[in-house]
Image (tube, rainbow, N blue to C red):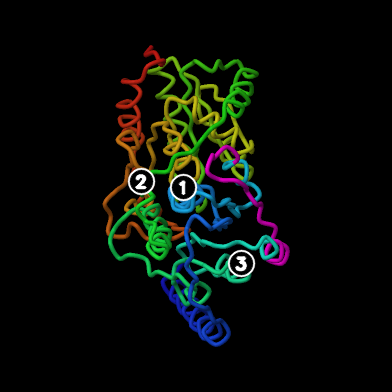
Amino acid sequence: MSTNGTGIKYLLKRTYLASRGFCIRLLVRSRKPVTVDPDSVRSILALRIDRIGDVVISLPAIKALHAIFPNAKISVLVRRSNAALLADTPYIAEVIPYAGLRRSAPRIRRMRFDIAVDMLMDYSIKTAVISYLSGAPVRAGFDIASRGRFFNIAITPDAKEKRMSEHILDIVRSAGILFKAEGRADWDPRPRLTVSEDAIDRAAYILRASGIKKDEGIISIHPGGHFPSQRWMPESFAKIVDMIAERYDARVVIIAGPTERKLAEGIAALAKTKTLLLVGRPLDEVAGAIAISKILICNNSGPLHMAAAIGTPTVSMMGPTDPALWRPQGDDQIVIKKDLSCSPCAAGRCYAHVCMKSITVDEVFEKAKGILDLKDGIKRR
């Protein structure tokens, strides 16, 4: 996009947010939160209707809610496609599939939640509105572009550089302080995702049907990303597949979402090595496949954060993404990023794409090799 086009988009956004903010300030009034004994809180709603990775990195905050309010039933509102991801999380009592504002808001209001926590750190107001309409006496969320008017615990994002999971924990910490119960939570910011044996068995069954045994050296690759600018080159992924097959007695699985089939098929066609495509499977099965993989090589994406939360090592490539916010936690979670003046930019599209094109296949392979050479259950050729 031209500089002029970018400037026009920026001005339109600023105008929209200013107009929206005026209307919100005029129409929305929030009462002060009513504090009670935290042990008397019976129901809590966490709102997270965006992407897979956002759901995963919110798990520490949801776990902290459970610790602060141990007698409360915690429900989480998520996209229908993400519901299976949380099915086995022990501290989540109910997963509510989002069915649009008109259908979901009345249903949630009828559920009469004591507390609603909107975990989105962005300017979109959809979840803020649902939180407000829920009628919950206590509503917490980020105060960005007048969103704070919908909450009675509204915090400004910390200017300090830290991971997104830590920012989200700040909302829950504010509620904990209000209820004088913040000492009940451990405030561990590292997400941990529970994968059931059933999900692992179903993933293993799919692999076995393609001649891949569960205990073979399985290496997974996810070439997708929400924005085109976040994706490493398909030909580079294909070369990585071949380099891995040349060095290791391993089987390569390409994971892809329903909209990423062509991308996965294109990489499989470019690679000389035979691969298995795992496309459009339920997220709990994807989690099962990641759990039995020795490593996941990917961009900044939902599967990256799933793998880190499961405990599977990763090598990821980040270009427009800010690693200070989105880098997964752990010594075996390797991020490759170039130090460029234009990065991170958070742009969805970039015609130059220098930040991703400059990451070489050899760099990625060396990082993956550093993990795989120390792994049990995978043999070198």
Q: Position of residue 96 (x, y in %)?
A: 65, 52
User: SS of the residue at dot 1?
Assistant: helix
Q: Is residue 111 left or right of residue 274?
A: right
Q: Nearer the viewer, residue 234 or 16?
A: 16
Given residues 285 and 237, the one toward you in this image is 285
Earlier-in-chain disc, 3 versus 1: 1
- 10 Å crowding of disc 3: few (<14), some (14-19), many (20+): many
Label pair 3/1, CB-CB below 8 angstroms: no
Per the rendered image, the range of residues in magenta is: 87-107
In this view of the protein, can residue 27 be seen by the observer?
A: yes
Label 1, on which residue? 63
Task: Name the amino acid, label 2.
Answer: Asp
Crowding near the residue tagged with mark 2, few <14, some 14–19, many ≥20 C-alpha atoms within 10 Å: few
Label 1 neighbourhood size at 10 Å, few (<14), some (14-19), many (20+)? many
Q: Are marks 2 and 1 in contact (CB under 8 Å)?
A: yes
Work out whether 64 lies above or below 20: above
Kind of element beneath mark 3: helix
- Disc 3 to disc 1, how far (Cα)? 22 Å
Disc 1 residue type? Lys
